[in-house]
Image: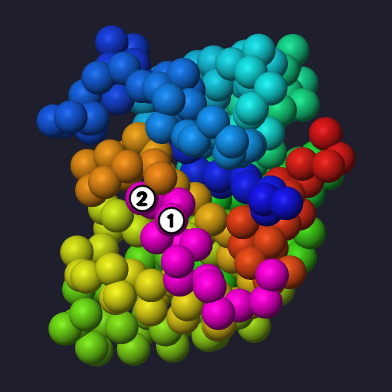
Amino acid sequence: MPMELIDSHVHVWDPVSGYPWLTGPLRRRYRLDDLRRCVEPDTSVSLIVVEAGRGDAAESSDLLALAATDPSIAGVVGTANLQCHGAGHRLEWLITGPHGRYLVGLRERLGGRLLANIGGAVAGQLAEHGLALEVNCSPQQFAQVGRLVELLGPDVPVVLDHLAGPPDAPHRIDALERWSGGLMDLAALPSVYVKLSGILTQLTGPSSWRSDLVRQAVDILGPGRTMIGSDWPVCVTGGSWATAIDSVRAALTDYAPPDIQRVLAGTARHVFRIADR
């Protein structure tokens, strides 16, 4: 029987609506129908759709409306610009909207303004509604991640995108040690999780190097705190959806089947409370 698969990091977009950062082959419309054409017919996959920086407040509500019409979407990680004034009202608007039940988390920009706004009522809203907080970060920001965890408390999962920013090439030994050492420190915080995403585009080394980084992340945090993510369609600039997924799977072959299943689906199901929705 094939293992369950939850792809924890998928985007959809149309450049006509915004997304000023898009360039090259990414600057075109990508829909979930495009992704489905990349998936083998006998493969069943559930999706966590993540905001992609469209540049306006309505992107999250549009993704939630899409989730209401597409059963392959297990949840939406939107954004409420929590680093800006009025964050609590924007978050409440998303939660109480017609499709708010599909909201499983928020992705926000890590920095001093987020840390200044995230405590108190906003942290309480996230905990009350079972929402995770997701950030992009580098090892230089791991201290801010620790502060974020402290402000949010133990009931709000903090998810670090794209392997938490390891060095992009194997010769950067000092950077690798900073990444792995910092990740070990964060592993002491039980609410910290890492997405095994961005494998094809964030890392320029050989496939063996990518596999080694995946295994290091899994070994440091454990299978129950790491989750697979394709970063589609960004991954098409370095391969394909299948290549992104298979790159992570290939790194896990020596793990026990229950641990592999945690990485492929169990962790995402737990963090984003998919069974509860």
The residue that mark 2 highlights is: 243
| Residue located farthest toward the left when viewing the structure as drawn | 24
Label 2 packing within 10 angstroms: few (<14), some (14-19), many (20+): some
Disc 2 residue type (three-letter):
Thr
User: Which circle marks residue 228 in the picture?
Assistant: none
Visual colour scheme: rainbow
Q: Is residue 176 above or below residue 152?
A: below
Residue 126 percent across, percent down from the top left? 73, 45
- Magenta highlight on residue 244: yes
For label 2, the SS is: helix
Is the magenta region chiefly helix, strand or loop? helix
Mark 1: give few (<14), some (14-19) or many (20+) Cα within 10 Å.
Answer: few
Q: Out of 75 and 117, give the one closest to the viewer.
A: 75
Task: Report if residue 99 lies within the magenta region.
Answer: no
Q: Mark 1 touching mark 2, by CB under 8 A? A: yes
Rendered residue at 29%/55% (across/down): 200
**Position of the C terminus by quadrant:** top right
Disc 1/disc 2 C-alpha distance (Å): 5 Å
Q: Quadrant of residue 219?
A: bottom right
Residue that carries the numbered disc 1 in the rendered image: 246
Q: Residue placed farthest to the right in the image?
A: 276
In magenta, the rendered stretch is 243-257
74 left or right of 242?
right
Say which quarter of the image contains residue 110. Answer: bottom left
Count of numbered labels shown in the rendering: 2
Foreground: 82 or 70?
70
Name the residue: 45% across, 66% down: 250
Circle 1 — which element? Answer: helix
Residue at 68 percent across and 38 percent down: it is 104
Q: Specify the amino acid type for callout 1.
A: Asp
Residue 28 position in % (x across, y down)? 25, 19
Compare residues 170 and 158 and report the one nearer the observer.
Answer: 170
